[in-house]
Amino acid sequence: MLMGILIGIESPLIAIQLLWINLVTDSLPAIALGLEPEDKNIMSKKPINSKKGIFADGLWSKIMVEGAMIGIITLLAFTIGNNMFGLEVGRTMAFATMSMLELIHAFNVRTDESIFSIGFFTNKYMCLAVAVGSVLQIGVITIEPIAKIFKVIPLTPLAWIIVMLLSISPLIIVEIQKQLNRFIFVERVYPQRKNAIRT
C-alpha cells in the first residue's frame, strides 16, 4: 500500500480487502503449519546455538526478500489489470493475486530446505488449508452479492491466468533464495553444518 502511494498510483487494495486477506491467509495455513510433520533427519542435525539471535542465519534477508516479493507481485497484478482492463479489474486482480500467492507461499515456509525435497503433499492439513482458502477467495470474487461487499468484479479467463501465473511465482523466487541462503549461511559461514544437513 505504501509503495503504491509513493509511486503515485491508485490504492491497489481497500481496507475490507486487506482484512479478508489477513483472515484467509493467516488462519487455516497457520494452523496447518503448527501440524507440520517432524523432519525425519532432525536427530542427525546439530542443535541450534542458544546464543544466536532470532534473526540469525539469514532471517533478515528472508523477511526483506519475501516481503518485497509479495508487495511487488501484487503491484504488478494491479498495474497489469489497471492498464489492460481498468481500475476495478486491477484492484480485483491485486486482491486475488495477493491472497492466492500468500496461500501458495505457505508451502515455502514449511521448511528451510527445498519444498520439492520434502514434497507438497506430506502435510495434508496444509493442502486442505490452501484448498479451502482458494475456494473462499474465488467465491468472494465470483459470487455477485459477496463481490459487491468487497468491491470486486468477476475476472475474465485471461485475467485469471495472469493471476495464477503471478501467484505461483513465489515457488520459484523462494527456491532461489533458499539455495543462496544455503550457500552463504551454511556452506560459507557455517561449513561445519554442511555435512549435518546433507546427512
Image (cartoon, helix red, strand yellow):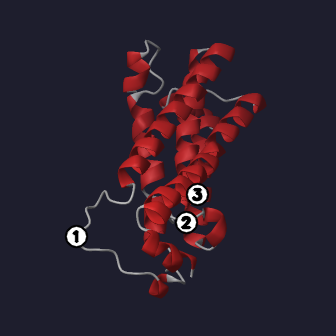
Q: Nearer the viewer, residue 94 or 57?
A: 57
Please tell me how crowded label 3 is: few (under 14), some (14-19), or many (20+) other residues with Cα within 10 Å. many
Q: Residue furthest bottom?
A: 43
Contact, mark 1 vs mark 2 (Cβ under 8 Å): no
Going from N to C along the chain, the mark reached first, 1 or 2, is: 1
Which residue is the extreme one toward the left? 51
Query: Can the viewer see residue 63?
Result: yes
Q: Gap in Å between the C-alphas at discs 1 and 2? A: 23 Å
Q: Earlier in the sequence, mark 1 or mark 3?
A: 1
Residue kind at label 3, given as amino acid type: Val
Query: Crowding near pointer 2: few (<14 within 10 Å), some, many (20+)?
Result: some
Figure check: 73 above or below 10: below
Residue 3 lies left or right of residue 98; in this view the side is: left
Could you tell me the amino acid type at mark 2?
A: Glu
Q: Residue at the location (57% across, 45% down)? A: 101
Residue 82 place in picture, x, y as percent: 60, 17
Describe residue 54's horizontal placement relative to residue 145 as left or right.
left
**Type of residue at label 1?**
Lys
Residue occupied by mark 1: 51
Residue 85 seen by the camera: no
Using a 10 Å C-alpha cutoff, classify the residue at mark 1 as few (fewer than 14 neighbours), some (14 to 19) or many (20 or more): few
Task: Label 2: state its secondary structure.
Answer: loop
In the rendered image, residue 118, in percent from the top left (x then y), is placed at 62, 71
Determine whether, in the image, residue 115 is placed left or right of residue 45.
Answer: right
Q: Residue at x 40, y 27 (%)?
A: 1
Tag 3 residue? 130
- Viewer-side label of 1, 2: 1
- Mark 1 in CB contact with mark 3 (< 8 angstroms): no
Question: What residue sits 38% from the left and 30% below the top?
Answer: 15
Which residue has dot 2 on it? 113
Indicate whether 64 appears above or below 75: below
Cα distance in 3D space between marks 2 and 3 = 20 Å
